[in-house]
Image (tube, grey):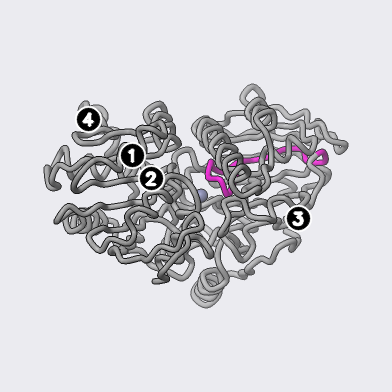
Amino acid sequence: MQITFYGAAREVTGSCELLEIGNQRILIDCGMFQGSDFNEGKNSDPLPFDPKSLTAVIVTHAHLDHVGRLPLLIRGGYTGHFYATPATIELAELILDDALEIMTYNHRKFSSPILYDTTDIAGVMQSFKPVDYYEPFVIPAETCLPAGRAGIQVAADSRVRGNDSGAVTVKFHEAGHIFGSVFVEITAEGKKVVFSGDIGNVDVPILRDTDPMPSGVDAVVCESTYGDRMHEKETERRQILEETITAGIKNGGIVMIPSFSLERTQELLYDLNELIDRQKRLPRVPIFLDSPLAIGATKVYRKYTQYYDDEAERLLRAGDDLFQFPGLSMTMTREESKKINFVPGAKIIIAGAGMMNGGRIVHHALRYLSDPKNTLLIIGYQAHGTLGRQILEGNTPVTIMGERVAVRCHVKAVGAFSAHGDQEKLMDWIAGGDTLPKKVYLNHGEPLASDALQKRLTDELGVKTTVVDKNLTVKV
Ligand code: ZN
């Protein structure tokens, strides 16, 4: 078997790997590249493979950098299935609809390209096959048609056949990264490979912990977003949140929190629910969840409570509404969003996009960044080139929607909210099975981060580790 890396190579977006086993061509994720522009130019390049030749597509989780180009596969003639957990499927629809809306808006404003339309998204949604955690399914060799149509059946009715020559067995494990996220174990030709998707942080609210590495793994493709960094301890995050908000709203300040609509926002709501409703540690100020996408995603969280960790399940059973508390308003429409400006005094605004490269947060940033009374609390990864990254690196003034804006507000970043594990977590995950993987391929990281993790894996664990380049093909 062989793996080719078509995206997220020495960068953190555009995840897309092709696994070839005999005449099977299985794609793992097909995400959007994101940089200073929401939809970076290279998303418009022709796909480096023929979508018609694919026999299956596996989707690890619903982040845009993992699902954002799935509709291009339909547009390119792919007629097989997309395999994902039920929660990922519902979240993916929200993400793709939102992406189309942003692309349409950017097209009107800046003539930037629109990659696909509602028909392509509908094609993706119709082709999804829900598969739950720990339910192995088979992509049988005999039903694989190299010319394109993938006559693939999920093995819910046909148990996994151990010695089916050429068959590919797939199993989803908990990645603990966002709701519904998986890492993927694939067994074929007597070999086993693991694709990490993205690996979550430790002790994340709501989510279950990342499952351990399976044993007997020949190769792991592992993300390395924070391969060079250590987060604050998870116990400190609520404290930092409390201190930052308390200081931020003093004297009528406004706290802006750019937040990824999936996971980070729900975790933030979960922590605010704890601090405001249960522990009464924060003063009551208006809090706005100003993101239709986040509001929609929160509904999915309410639906699949079987994926909650023990603590969230306990609170749920005790009758606590995890995502609603006094003072919280969810502003769905543009009109409701605009009215936030007229709410006097201290307030907290949670809005997307998480890297400030689009979405409603940009409008709030334009209005509030230059007032020293205000605070910008950054809780997620800021990719190179994004507005969030520019501010985080101390640049001022910055350009927002064509206007120069001085950054005079407080800027605070908290790594403990990251949806990605830090260097220690990734080391622990890779080394956490009964046996060490024989090889590790690092992707989904900027060069410094991937290189630092490679060094530790090589020096401390003695695992052969490669930082992958774009279009690199490796044999397993
Ligand atoms: Zn992700």
Callout 2: 10 Å neighbours few (<14), some, many (20+)?
A: many
Report which residue position mark 3 lands on: 2
Q: Which residue is mark 2?
A: 351
Where does the magenta region start and end?
A: 52-67
Identified by mark 2, the residue type is Ala
Element carrying mark 1: strand
- Residue found 27% across the figure and 58% down from its top: 375
Badge 4 or badge 1: first in the primary sequence: 1
Q: Provide the secondary structure element on which disc 4 rests.
A: loop
The alpha-carbon separation of the residues under discs 4 and 2 comes to: 24 Å
- Check disc 3: other Cα within 10 Å, few if <14, some if 14-19, many if 20+: few
Q: Is residue 410 above or below residue 181?
A: below
Q: CA distance from mark 3 to mark 4?
A: 49 Å
Q: Position of residue 30 (x, y in %)?
A: 65, 46
Q: Is residue 456 left or right of residue 203?
A: right
Q: Which marked residue is nearer to the observer: mark 3 or mark 4?
A: 4
At a point 37% along the width and 66% down the height, the residue shown is 406
Q: Which residue is mark 4?
A: 320
Work out which residue is located at the far right of the displayed protein and give it. 147
* Category of crowding for the residue at label 1, using alpha-carbon neighbours closer than 10 angstroms: few (below 14), some (14–19), many (at least 20): many
State which tag comes first along the sequence, 3 or 4: 3
Name of the residue lying farthest toward the front = 403
Q: How many marks?
A: 4
- Disc with the residue nearer the chain's start (4 vs 2): 4
Q: Tell whether 195 sits left or right of 407.
A: right
Q: Which residue is mark 1?
A: 289
Q: Gap between marks 3 and 1, in whole Å?
A: 44 Å
Measure how far apart labels 3 and 2 are at the Cα level.
41 Å
Residue 240 percent coordinates (x, y): 23, 58
